Image (tube, rainbow, N blue to C red):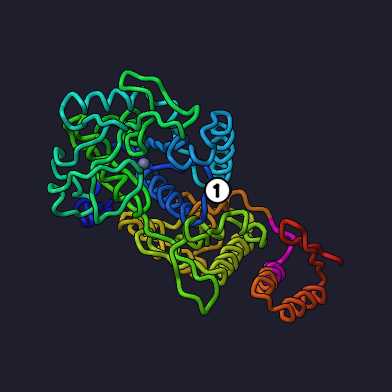
Amino acid sequence: MKIFNTLSRKVEKFEPINPPSVGIYTCGPTVYSRAHIGNLRTFVSTDILKRILNFLGYKVSHVMNITDVDDKIIKESKGEKNKQKEITQKYEKLFFDDLKELNIEMPEKTPRATENIQKMVDMIKNMVQKGYAYKTEDGIYFSIQKSKNYGELAGLKNVSGTKIRIKNDKYEKDNPQDFALWKFYDKEDGQIYWDTEIGKGRPGWHIECSAMSTKCLGESFDIHTGGTDLIFPHHTNEIAQSEAVSGERFVKYWVHGGFLNIKENPSAEAEKMSKSIGNVITLDSLKEKNINPLAYRYLTLTSHYRSEMNFSWEALIGAQSALEKLFDFYNEFGKNIGKADKKYVSEFKKLLEDDLAMPEAVALVWKLVKDDSVENEDKKATLLEFDKIFAFGLDKLKKEEIPQEIRKLASERELARKNKEWEKADQIRKKIEILGYELKDTKNGFELKSVK
Ligand SMILES: [Zn+2]
């Protein structure tokens, strides 16, 4: 198996520290708002990586943290402890529901930051003792000058000259700074603080991940994943803190997923999907348009995980039709399940091992479906084998009552309505009626019913 390592900027041979065990840590959500489909793309990629490693015979233990205390959460809950709990529990649940809808396997462990404060305090104490960290009037800071190779992951140069400090968890790559490990109590924090040996206050965001990853996977582990936006400062700082404490290499392979850009309509420019720009789409917005979340899973697999992906509703509707066509083929191949085709499975495996070549793996599905030299029942068995990675849910498939053609028309009408093309939307609705189906608009999108 080969995988791209952000640290070396090369595709490397994957050799775990203690085979066949593989430890993976993923930066989980900050639970104060709904995850958007750009965030979810990264979690699909990690799910694919994990399924591939299990498929290849490794034994993966996967840890994903829940950030339930940070600057944004405190602001959102106005320093009220009850409110903090209410907000974080609500969004944690919604996030786990999203994972389920996308057939993403739950990690073995999902530690919460607020339940691991002592480990963070211990690490900070250790860094102060060794001279990596120092105390100021508003917090305890990490001195990046003391760190060997600070910024290597992000490719930073000339880090040593800096002596500026930053308390915020996020800052720009052009300006590496000493960052807060522990933030002393400020009255804006309200009831949200911990009384500890290093003072009354709360942790910085970066130390949360260093603490939870090493607590669950050991001081040195195999794979750390996240979106490319986390390379700096978050992952850069995770490395600095963790290696300062342990004196060992923190992570062997850094695996980062590309951004999702959105094109709101065919003539618009593609821009990054982000909460701050206000162009986010959630799984709910998909379901409102009667789009199966798994169509989004399919769509993400048609781009390589490292490339930026341009999202458009047209592309998503295309992915939904492709997925439904696959479901139809699978059903039409009959009831019997034969033997997986060795040639196809070996070709598939080769693609998985080649830095997760999923677009090519998706293309292989269609090559198989159309290959007359393979028996239908063997095609079914092979598709089921592929689906261990794709996880489109072929094994749970029941025959849908509404034909694909009708569902496609309904999605097209929804798109026309979104683009305010009322006449076109009306025409499509009439067509659906002529074909014997009724379309009803509801507050959650639309419903289709046969009127025969
Ligand atoms: Zn993290």
Residues 425 and 331: in front is: 425
Q: Is residue 290 magenta?
A: no
Secondary structure found at label 1: loop
Residue 284 horizontal/vertical position (percent):
62, 54
Residue 385 appearing in the image: no
- Above or below — where is 47 with respect to 190? below
Residue 80 appearing in the image: yes
Residue 359 horizontal/vertical position (percent):
41, 64
Q: Is residue 311 left or right of residue 394?
A: left
State the residue lying farthest toward the top. Answer: 197
**Which quadrant would the C terminus be assigned to in this image?**
bottom right
Which residue, given by chain and number where applicable, does mark 1 sit on?
Answer: 34
Q: Is residue 404 magenta?
A: yes
| Quarter, ligand 1 | top left
Q: Amino acid at mark 1?
A: Arg
Magenta-tinted stretch? 399-410
Q: Is residue 17 left or right of residue 289?
A: left
Residues 424 and 70: in front is: 70
Residue at position x 40%, y 48% in the image: 46
Residue 208 horizontal/vertical position (percent):
36, 34
